[in-house]
Each structure stands twice: as C-alpha cells, then as structure tokens.
Amino acid sequence: MLIRRRRSWELPESAATPEHVFLSRRALLGGAAGLVALAGAPGLAQAQAAGDPAGDPTRDLYPAARNPAFTVSTPLTPEDVSANYNNFYEFGSDQMNYSIARIAARMPRRPWTVKIDGLVEQPREVGIDDIIRAMKLEERLYRHRCVEAWSMTVPWTGFPMKDFVAFAKPLSGAKYVQMETFVNPKVAPAQNRFIYPWPYVEGLTMAEATNDLAFLVTGIYGKPAPNQYGAPLRLAVPWKYGFKSVKSIVRFSFVAERPVGLWEKVQGQEYGFWANVNPQVPHRRWSQASERDIGTGERRPTLIYNGYGEQVASLYSGLEKTEKLFM
Ligand code: MTE
C-alpha cells in the first residue's frame, strides 16, 4: 500500500552541496549506519533503552481524557501505519521501511531541556518534565496533511499551545514564536551532512500560536509519543501543511521579526511562512486538490485549511492581497 516515491519536495543532495564535497562525503560515510558509528553513538541496546517511550517519566499521565471539541470525520490511521511513515529529516529521508522509526529510537529522551528566550519577561531553561507537569494533558483527534499530498488522522495527546505561551510570559513586542529542533549529529545521522541548514526551524504568529487549535504534542495513541513523531515535544497545527509542525523542540524564541523556516531557507519559492492548506493553490510541481490517506489508501478531496476553516480563517482576513497564505 505504501508506494516508495522519490521525495520530490527536497533538493537533491548534489544540488545543495558542491559536487566534490558531496561525492567524497558519500564515499567516506556510506549510509546512516556508518554515520552513527562514526559519530561514536552509544551501543545500540543502550541507545534504544534511552529512547524507549515505555521508560518515559511522564507515562503516568496517560491516557489523558479526550477533548470532544476536537473530533474528525475521517477514520483514525492505524498506529502501525502512522508509526512507520514519518518525515524526520534529521534521521534520514527514507520515510518508509521503518528506518526513521528505527534510527530515531536511539535518541535519548532525557535529559531534555527547553529554552524559552527572546522577548519574554524572564528568559529561562526548563526541564521537559516540569513543562509537561505544569500543563493539563488532553487527547485530540486531528487530521494531518503533508505538503506531499498524503494525510492521516491521529489521536495526539498534549496541551494547548496558548497555555504554553502563558507559561512563557512573552512581552508585548513579541509578534512571532520561533521554534527549533535539537542538533545532535551523534544520534541524528543526517545532521552530519550539510545539505540542510540545521536546526530545523519553524514559526507562527502570536495569533496563530494562541489559536485554540495550535497544540503541543507529547503523546499519541494514549501513550508518550515514540521518538519518530517528534518526542518529547512537537507542534501540531492541523490547518497548515505538515512541515510547519516542528518536532523534538528544544527552543521557543519570542521575536519581533518573522522567522524563516528551514524549508523556506532551502526552497523559498515553494515553501513559505504561512503554508495554509488550500486545494486550489497547487504546489509548483504538483496539485494539492486531493490527498492519499495513508491508513485507508484512498484518495479524497483536500479541504481548505484542511477542514479547519471555521476555527482559523479569520486569522488571515485582510492578508490575502499582500501575503502568500497558501505556500
Ligand atoms: N520536524 C523536524 N524537526 N524535522 C522534520 O524533518 N518534518 C515535517 C514535520 N516536522 C520534520 C519536522 C514534515 S515535512 C511533516 S509532514 C511532519 O513533521 C511529519 O510528521 P509525522 O512524521 O509525525 O507524520
């Protein structure tokens, strides 16, 4: 059912790296397993234990009560399908064949600190468990639409991003929140290659970040999220293409200038800041009119704002003429 495709929305490695560097690095490293060994990663068994969600110190908080306000009409994607179909480029670009899940499993989940800085009352670093325990976890069923025209429906557990914004205490000059993923080439093999400008960065306006739908995810299917989903903390903004939903966050910066995300840096004509789902605005290289549900294998029409227009369309009124809201 899962057809192996070339990942057409990324730059080929050879296009972003001078050819001699690309060729010699390939010859030297020869694949993800070699990269991990070269980087001196811990033994496999030890690394997998550190990355195992069964040992997560917050597992007593699961399952969290489902919030009935956030439900869906599409069927839930089976766990074994969504857990093995992931985009997490730090761990490689082979979305299928279980490889992202397998490699990501070696990432230690603790210690994990989150930096809160920029325009806030008090910049600080907080342990992830202190953040999670300060919030009230709930489960929400969300649709998830990737810019590559596949989709799934999953039961996330987490907390409203607006609660985290209140916890961070931004100053009035903060207009955006910028989020960053960890950088640790010892466990994330692709960070040894300089194809992408790591860290993975994404941003939201303050109005988006405090919209009811913006959700910070800690778990899935009633358990702490396995690493490949972006443990221990990732974003879910279901009205936007999936690349906005940054994984394994280590930093929230409240800023006055619009952040430039990793994909915008790499391919700004195709991936922008807003990235709201719109079936009528094609990607430069393919249509966005429909999507393939990775759970059922069926193709269905894509909806404006991925079906969440009622909750979010008002965020963008007046911006249509000046902003590229749908890329
Ligand atoms: N976050 C980081 N740090 N690295 C990534 O490669 N991929 C993005 C997004 N967040 C990505 C990321 C893309 S393209 C998508 S579609 C979603 O994560 C995929 O989330 P999933 O694997 O949980 O479905």
Image (cartoon, rainbow, N blue to C red):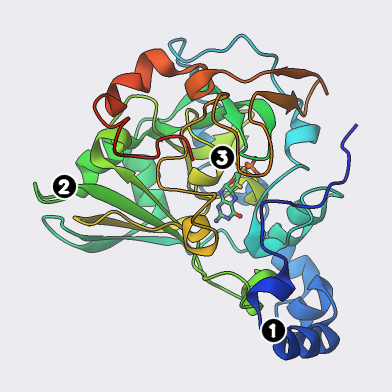
Question: For numbered disc 2, what is the local secondary structure?
Answer: loop
Q: CA distance from mark 3 to mark 1?
A: 30 Å
Q: Position of residue 162 (x, y in %)?
A: 28, 34
Q: Which residue is mark 1?
A: 39
Q: Position of residue 125 (x, y in %)?
A: 29, 63
Q: Quadrant of the N terminus?
A: top right
Q: Which residue is mark 3?
A: 242
Image quadrant assignment for residue 41: bottom right
Q: Position of residue 48 (x, y in %)?
A: 73, 61
Mark 3 / mark 2, whichever is N-terminal: 2
Contact between marks 1 and 2 (CB within 8 A): the answer is: no
Q: Which residue is mark 2?
A: 169
Question: For numbered disc 1, what is the local secondary structure?
Answer: loop
130 left or right of 54 in image: left
Contact between marks 3 and 2 (CB within 8 A): the answer is: no
Tell me which residue sits at (48%, 19%) in the image.
65
Mark 1 / mark 2, whichever is N-terminal: 1
Which of these two is toward me, 51 or 211?
A: 211
Tell me which residue sits at (33%, 24%) in the image.
212
Which of these two is toward me, 226 or 321?
A: 321
> Mark 3, residues whose alpha carbon is within 10 Å: few (<14), some, or many (≥20)?
many
> Mark 2, residues whose alpha carbon is within 10 Å: few (<14), some, or many (≥20)?
some
